[in-house]
Image: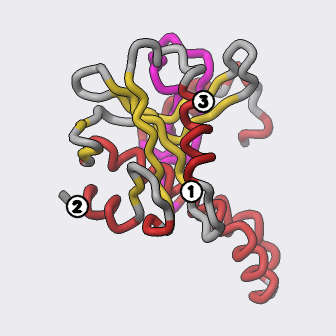
Amino acid sequence: VWGSLQPTNLAGPLDKLLQLGYVMREVPFGEGHRSSKKSLYKIADPFLNFYFRFVVPNRSFIEIEQSSTVLELFSARFPRYVSGIWEEICRQAVPALTIGGIKFRPAGRWWGSPEKGGALELDVVAESLDGRHLLVDECKWTDKEINPDQLKGELFKKAAYLPFSKGKTIVPVVFIKQGGRMMFSYVFGPKEILDALRS
C-alpha cells in the first residue's frame, strides 16, 4: 500500500498513524514542530518497532524454521537496536535527574549542518530550568573502552556549533552502558537512569 502512494498523498495516512501513537515525529531540539523542515518520522510503539526491525525482514527464514540463521541475523543487529532504545530512555530520564545541582527541562536530539561544521548530531540536548545551562550528551551502549577526555572535548566542540548555545554554560554528560569505567564529571549508567525514571 505504502509503495503505491505518492509523497503528496502520505499526509493523511501519516497523520492517522501519529494520532494513534504508532508513529512519532521528531524535529531537532530548539525547533518548533510547526516551523521545522527537518522532520524525522519513526515507529513509536516498541512492539511494532521490534516486529518491523526483526520479524518482517526475516519472515521467510522464520517460515521455513531456519532458527540458526534468524538468531545470527538477530544477534548482528540487536546491539544497534538497543543503542537506539537506550538513547530514547536517556532523553526521557533527563528531567528527573539533578546534574551538578542543576535541573533540566525535557530533552531532545539535535542534528544539523552548521556552517563550516559539517553534519553534526547530539544524542541528548536539554536546557536548564533557569535557561543558563545547556546539557549536551553522548549515549554510548558499548563494551569498548572510551577516552573520557576525548569525548568531553568532542562534546564541547559540537556544542559550539549549536545555534542556541551562545551565552549558556555547557554541561557535558555521558550516558553509558558501563558507567563506572570512566573518570568523567557526569556519567550515568543504566541503574541511575532506571532509578530516575522510577522516581
Of the two numbered discs 2 and 1 on the same chain, state the one appearing first in sequence.
Answer: 1
- According to the picture, the residue beneath numbered tag 3 turns out to be 158
* Residue type (three-letter) at the residue carrying disc 3: Lys
The answer, for residue 184, to whether it is visible in the render is yes
Residue 62 drawn at (x, y percent): 74, 80
Residue 152 part of the magenta segment: no
* Residue type (three-letter) at the residue carrying disc 1: Lys
Of the two numbered discs 3 and 2 on the same chain, state the one appearing first in sequence.
Answer: 3
Tag 3 and tag 1, C-beta contact below 8 Å: no
Tag 3 and tag 2, C-beta contact below 8 Å: no
The answer, for residue 18, to whether it is visible in the render is no
User: What residue is shown at x 65% (from left), y 67% (from top)?
Assistant: 144
> In the structure shown, which secondary structural element does the residue marked by tag 1 occupy?
strand
Specify the quadrant that holds the C terminus. Answer: bottom left
Which residue, as the protein is rendered here, is positioned at the far left?
A: 199
Asked whether 64 or 98 is in front, the reply is 98
Specify the quadrant that holds the N terminus. Answer: top right
- According to the picture, the residue beneath numbered tag 2 turns out to be 198
Magenta stretch: dominant SS? loop
Q: Which of marks 2 and 1 is in front?
A: 1
What range of the chain is rendered magenta? 21-47
> In the structure shown, which secondary structural element does the residue marked by tag 3 occupy?
helix
* Residue type (three-letter) at the residue carrying disc 2: Arg
- According to the picture, the residue beneath numbered tag 1 turns out to be 140
User: What residue is shown at x 39% (from left), y 28% (from top)?
Assistant: 134
* Number of other residues with Cα within 10 Å of mark 2, as a class: few under 14, some 14 to 19, many 20 or more: few
Q: Label 2 vs label 1: CA separation?
A: 21 Å
